[in-house]
Amino acid sequence: MRSPILDYLDGIIAETAHVDSGALADYIPELAAADPDRVAVALCTVNGTVYASGDSEHLFSIQSMSKPFAYALAIEDRGLGDVLERIGVEPSGEAFNELSLDPETGRPRNPMINAGAIAAHALVRGGGSEAVDRVLALFSELAQRPVGIDESLAASELATGDRNLGLAYLLHASDRLAQDPGTAVRGYVRQCSASVTVHDLALMAATLANGGVQPNTGARLFSRRTTRHLLSVMTSCGMYDAAGDWLTGIGIPAKSGVAGGIIGVLPGQVGLAVFSPRLDPHGNSARGVEMMRRLSEDLGLHLMEAGRPARSSLRETHTTTVEGRTATVYVLQGDLVLSSVESLVREIIERPPATDVVVFDMSRVDEVLPVARRTSAETATKLVDNGYRIILVDPEQTLHGFRDSRGRDVERWSSARLAKSQR
Ligand code: GLN
């Protein structure tokens, strides 16, 4: 039986067939020779299953979609502080290849435009061909297959690469380049010439959606913090001077490449990749943008879409008898996050328990976020200070090692003991 998700992706391709606006990038002669009608789409959830449709095995160059990954590698190598000293995180509002640095700091404005991406490449440990090898090894781990370079494309871009060389000299002159300009541009261009499919890109994007862990191999390739930082930069800067339109209309952290690819990442859910070589005036794939728009709309992926409101964590309150005394039982449920725990705490503050003994039954709780744990510890302190006796029933140990905010242990009972005591 064919998956309905594949049927859906086929539909995305069929329904965007009319979008034939835009033009091939021609400042790199090899790109101008691409078949403009190739089209592909792929989706990979954080469980690691890839669904792909169209020319999903067609290889094309990764181009600027390499920038986020090389930037993350530089951060892992050098630390975020060092990288931020050389490369900013502000949207530039300019074209990807603009010959400009921030007039105040002399830094490239962000790592998604060429100036910042060249500077980021030059920060990858090893330098020269070792840095390129390490970037390729990273792509290969992300995509779970050996990723290579399209050598004739790299040669074609290098032969016409004056603009990037100009940027590198500008960086060098303002002391923002960790390498000599020629080496940095050569390495950066080779990084951009890595040959990938939408299938590869969906896995790469899904790794970012999964907090930096490749969903199938389980390898941690970037720390959670690096991944969060990277996705923030992709959100504000990934689509160049179309970033505002993209964020409001489509709302997925993304990065485009001048060969026609776009990747999108919805944290915690899914990595997306689309491909179609004709570009709009911003240098983003015209049909690719339309495919992404539909994916975002149909699959409910817009980052700013209010999620399902967290239910109150308080399922019910009842009284029972514990060791011959009346006790109030709070039965909690679901994930304890800020909003759900706030309603529980409000209930306790506004209607303090009428019995001295208070039982918190956690057996229906799935997960407790740090904020909820802290708030619970503070609430427990107030209860104990006001003379209440607290009993925690927590069979799944969702509050493992819980103490109140003064470090006092709380009494723990098993569900069986509570049941027996109630009789
Ligand atoms: N290698 C390309 C360049 O430097 C990448 C640009 C892009 O994909 N937007 O011009």
Image (cartoon, helix red, strand yellow):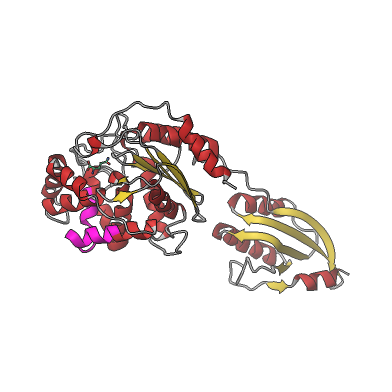
Q: Position of residue 67 (x, y in %)?
A: 29, 49
Q: Position of residue 345 (x, y in %)?
A: 66, 54
Q: Residue furthest right?
A: 423
Number of numbered markers: 0
Q: Nearer the viewer, residue 343 or 231?
A: 231
Residue 344 visible here: yes
* Ligand 1 sits in quadrant: top left
Q: Nearer the viewer, residue 24 or 128?
A: 24
Residue 124 visible here: no
Q: Position of residue 269 (x, y in %)?
A: 51, 49
Locate residue 348 relative to residue 144 in the image: left or right: right
Instruction: Judge whether 382 appears above or below 232 on screen.
Output: below
Q: Nearer the viewer, residue 385 or 10?
A: 10
Report if residue 119 lies within the magenta region. yes
At x 46%, y 35%, the residue is 13
Q: Position of residue 217 (x, y in %)?
A: 44, 63
Q: Nearer the viewer, residue 281 or 30?
A: 30
Report if residue 384 lies within the magenta region. no
Instruction: Judge whether 319 appears above or below 304 on screen.
Output: below
Quarter of the rendering containing residue 141: bottom left
At x 61%, y 70%, the residue is 400
Quarter of the rendering containing residue 183: bottom left
Locate residue 262 relative to residue 149 in the image: left or right: right
What residue span does the magenta drawing correspond to?
Answer: 118-136
